[in-house]
Image (cartoon, rainbow, N blue to C red):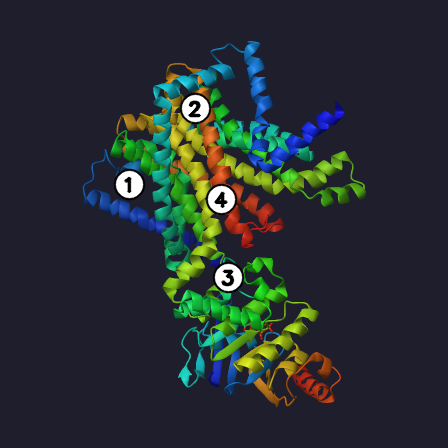
Amino acid sequence: MKDLTIRNLSKTYFDPYAGTNVTAVHDVSLKVEQGEFVCIVGPSGCGKTTILNMIAGFIPYTGGEILVGGRPVKGPGPDRGVVFQSFALFPWRTVLENVAFGPKMRGVRKVEREQIAHEYLALAKLTEAAGRYPAELSGGMQQRVGVVRALANEPDVLLMDEPFASVDAQTRMTLQEELTRIWQEKRPTVIFITHDVAEAVFLANRVVALSKGRVLDDIAVDLPRPRSWDALNDDARFKELSNRVLQLVRSA
Amino acid sequence: MLWRLSSALWFCAPFMVLLVLWAVFIPYFDVNPRLFPHLSSVVQAGIEGVEDGTLIRHIGASLLRVAVGTVLALLIAVPLGVAMGVSPIISSFLTPLFRFFSVLAGIAWIPIATLWFGYGFGAITFVIFNAVFFIVTYNTLLGVSTIPLQVRNAAASLGAGRWAMLTEVLLPGALPNIVTGIRTGLGFAWRGLIAAEMIATNVGLGYMLFVARDFYRTEVIVLGMIVIGVLWLLLDRLVLAPIERATIERWGMVQRA
Amino acid sequence: MKQFLLKMWSHCVRLAARWPSIASIAPFIPVVAAWWIVTELQIFPRVFLPGPVEVVRSFGSLVYTGILPAYLQDSIVRLAVGAFWGVALGIPLGILVGLNKRARTALWPLLLFFQAIGDIAWLPILVIWFGYGLTTITVVIVYTVIFPVVLNTVLGVRSIPITLHRAAQSLGASRIRMLWEVVLPGALPNIVTGLRNGLGYGWRALIATEIIVGTSGIGFLMFDARRSGSVVEILLGMIILGILWYIVDSWILAPIERATGQRWGLVTR
Ligand SMILES: Nc1ncnc2c1ncn2[C@@H]1O[C@H](COP(=O)(O)OP(=O)(O)OP(=O)(O)O)[C@@H](O)[C@H]1O
Ligand SMILES: [Mg+2]
């Protein structure tokens, strides 16, 4: 696991229909320490996905720089795992084969990579589903596969773009608790994007609020771990932090 | 607007390149016109064909056959398909039968059609009728029988009578399938038409091609091929595909090439 | 008595459930029976519409003389060879056109146009180029099969969600591996559909070609019979064609199509 440095990052889209430039990300600087869990919150259209896609290397940036472990980002790579909002599981591979995909690309032998996959599936309580195809899973299960697929590749940084937005509230809470548990076990560097202020405070060490392509503020979350919704629902500190972040986002 | 214009231009560009290559390379390598014609002689043949009316006559004959065969087939196929599709037992019993015949559709009927009807309009129209009829009936049957029972029950409990059930539920529900059937069936019919005209008539585009072959008039052959291609492209892209898109893609999610 | 009939009925139902092919044969029984009755009653002249018995008899004699097996083999081999080349050329071309924007602008309009010309219309000029023979037939079939395969492959490649490409890339897949791991399987259901359509067209093109320029094969058999006025053999040819294609399409191609598309949840039906 390595740290992540973003310096004066900017992104300008060219709109071919209108023939104009749209600046989605202005001048964003951010430092994420190794093993840190950072949530980025902000209103719709403020540039969260754009930043994440640039870190992942899916789209080029037009200014500034992104360094992972001191090395600049050029295109996608296995050092940065991505969890997608739409899951993006390979429908033609079983759950096990999906999770084993990353190791396979690294050239890990079949027996070993299946062992790795089984290990991670157990971590997400998915052992039973190993032989099934994604289409045969519920949304919540699919996203758990999405998370462990990214983790099984042992990336330096884990990037997550609203990964729990399309599952129901009950499942989402379970997934959030599981994610904190897995994070504590593996301690990857995580950048997690969300709309949901409570989710951000629940998961993160640090919440970064974004508005119109700029960083508004940076709030440290000093809640003790392991965290669970049962304990935090009535926690005064949790409420206070949530309120602060909420005020910040609404003022944007 | 500007964007549409430029995409239309981009669509035409490859053809321009092809025409230029044709105009340059065929004379350059001095290809025997009995093997492949010069661009200019194809244009010449086109102009002559229009001026003396032969080309128009061939096109007219072919289109008339397709129109008559298709309309007749549709008039019978759609009501028949709906009637059979209403009862699940009848439709599941008849499905294999119609699949079998839609598999035979078109070209395979040419020999027997020419025996039954003699060479000429009757035999060719019969081939087209066959190509469209079985496929459209099969697809209508399929379309009606896949309308969920709940939808039919819902309509009935909302007070739909027999006629309303037909026009408001069964026909619209089967329409995407019917349109797909027409498009597929016409595809087979068009090919069947060309094949049948090569064998069994003395007018029509297929005949024009096949006769030109006897005299090694490649410019007429290539002209005929281009006309066949353009006609089908116009029919398929400007009439059939938009209708299909309007029904299938708006109501469902299926996409087709 | 009623008990007995019910028991028979339940036997039939169970049999049909065990072997679905029986359910698909059953509807032909009344059709053949009606055909037989019509010919026995001599509603149409016998030369115009021979009965099932004559067709079976001619089947027997054509098999006995070895003509039918030889012709059948010719037709099937031609179709198989044409289909093989159609797929071997069509899938790579489809992937190229699907993935590469420049290739698409250059080739897509041409593909649509040349598909529209249709296989049969090529016959006259192909005969001038290659004469009456195997080359002409093979070219026609390859030409027929290749377009549905290419167009459907393009559609399949283009319908793969971009997130799948991104997921594979960020899991460390190289460009070559992406072809094998993402593009090909993602497009596979469409490719199978294309192959199915292509074979449907190719098979008809084969018959037409054999009728017009052939010297052997089922299509030739039918046209030869037409020349000598033997309706029996024409009907036999049609029935063989129908059965053959029915078997290939519904017992081989359709199940493959369903097996790829449905379990993956790419096709909802
Ligand atoms: N490909 C593109 N071309 C042009 N403009 C774009 C493109 N992608 C995004 N934008 C613009 O960039 C801005 C930021 O978009 P982005 O998707 O990053 O927002 P977001 O914060 O992720 O929003 P949401 O919370 O709704 O997902 C928006 O104004 C959007 O319109
Ligand atoms: Mg977003």
| Residue A227, image quadrant | bottom right
Q: State the separation of the CA atoms marked 4 and 2.
A: 35 Å
User: Mark 2 highlights which residue?
Assistant: C237
Residue wearing tag 1: B39
Secondary structure beneath label 3 = loop
Instruction: Dividing the image into four quarters, tell me where ligand 2 lies.
Output: bottom right
Q: Amino acid at mark 2?
A: Gly
Q: Which label lies toward us, 4 or 1?
A: 4
Which residue was labeled with disc 3? A90
Where residue A22 sits in the image (x, y, percent)? 52, 74
Instruction: For marks 2 and 1, give the CA distance.
Output: 42 Å
Q: Is residue C189 left or right of residue C11?
A: left
Residue closest to the eye, A160 or C16? C16
Taking the spot 65% from the left edge, 67% from the top edge, the residue there is A167
| Coordinates of residue C192 in the picture (x, y in percent) | 46, 47
| Element under disc 2 | helix
Q: Can you tell which quarter of the image residue B54 is in?
A: top left
User: Label 2: chain?
Assistant: C
Do labels 2 and 1 touch, CB within 8 Å? no
Q: Position of residue C170 (x, y in %)?
A: 45, 71
Residue in the image at 33% along x and 26% along y: C216
Query: Number of labelled discs?
Result: 4
Residue B237: assigned label: 4
Observer-side mark, 2 or 1, equals 2
Kindly state the secondary structure of the residue where label 1 is placed: helix
The Cα atoms of the two marked residues, 4 and 1, are separated by 26 Å
Q: How far apart are labels 3 and 4 at the CA level?
A: 34 Å
